[in-house]
Image (tube, rainbow, N blue to C red):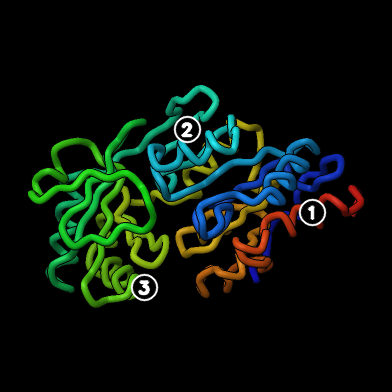
Amino acid sequence: MRSKESSGPAELSGFPYKLIATDLDGTLLRSDHSVSRRTREALAAATAAGAAHIVVTGRAVPWTRHVLDDLGYRGLAVCGQGAQVYDAGEHRLLTAVTLDRQLAAVALAKIEAEVGALYLAASRAGLDGEVLVGPGYALNGPLPTTPFTDVSDLWAAPLNKLYVQHPTLTSDELAEASRQAAGGFVTVAMAGEGIVELLPLGLTKATGLSLAARRLGAKRTDTIAFGDMPNDIPMFTWSTHGVAMANAHADLKAIADEVTSSNDDDGIARVLERLLSRPANQ
């Protein structure tokens, strides 16, 4: 468990946090990519009590927008692993960070020099940025992509990130090897099995969350965060209370303040319901 420098979150009537930050995959979304009725109702009750709900996801906006629209979500969302702050109500980007393509190419070459050829994909910048997927890259989930065969296509337009996979290394092994080889050029994030990302140096979910929180008038001491993967560690470190799902990666559980039930067992709802039933002065 983490120790906290702050004395605790701000008090609201019926709910002790001003901001609820939730990851999407493996956290808010169930295995069938839906959000349960119980979780929707718990979030609605928390927001009615004065909290704001903010989605913080590794997905870029084009892979996030349909989920937000289905939820009737009109607030801010942090997308692209912190690269984008998106206003879902107005369907516009408020902030955006792109990957330096020259540095990314150097980083990729350094990683491949250590581990051999990689399978590649890339997320292009912008509200409608395509996700390019190269030969051999295995996509997780039914999401729209554009195939490519010529690696030079990766560098033809601004990018949010690169995705890398290896034919034999696990994602944890590939992430560690990538950090060792190229950690001075890019941030390496492990967002799930088969999802290792190369990002602008220094960028994390905490980067985008802090920007969005400032716009909402909330502080880190006002924030509870839910997640399931190592890329959520910076978000937990930034927030005052981090809740890992039962299905979470061991590295995230190790630094979480508590562990709830899984994403398929209404883990977010269980925590919110407990907090909503707590007297406001506790």
Q: Are marks 3 and 1 in contact (CB under 8 Å)?
A: no
Looking at the image, tell me whether mark 3 or mark 1 is earlier in sequence order: 3
- Graded by Cα atoms within 10 Å as few (under 14), some (14 to 19) or many (20 or more), the crowding at tag 1 reads some
Q: Quadrant of residue 275?
A: bottom right
Q: CA distance from mark 3 to mark 1?
A: 34 Å
Name the residue that disc number 1 marks: 273
Residue at 64% across, 61% down: 243
Residue type for callout 3: Asp
Of the 4 image quadrants, the one containing the N terminus is bottom right
Mark 2: secondary structure: strand
Please state the horizontal and vertical placement of residue 45, each as a whole percent of the image: 78, 42
In space, the residues marked 2 and 1 are separated at their CA atoms by 28 Å
Is 254 on the left or on the right of 16, as rendered? Answer: left
- Residue at 33%, 32% in the rendered image: 128
Q: At x 56% / y 69%, what residue is drawn?
A: 247
Where does residue 189 sit, x and y in percent of width and height? 38, 59
- List the residue tagged with mark 2: 86
- Kindly identify which numbered label has been placed on residue 172: 3
Q: Earlier in the sequence, mark 2 or mark 1?
A: 2
Q: Residue 216 falls in which quadrant of the image? A: top right
* Residue 162 pos. (x, y %): 26, 52
Q: Marks 2 and 3: CB-CB under 8 Å?
A: no
Q: Left of 276 or right of it: where is 94?
A: left
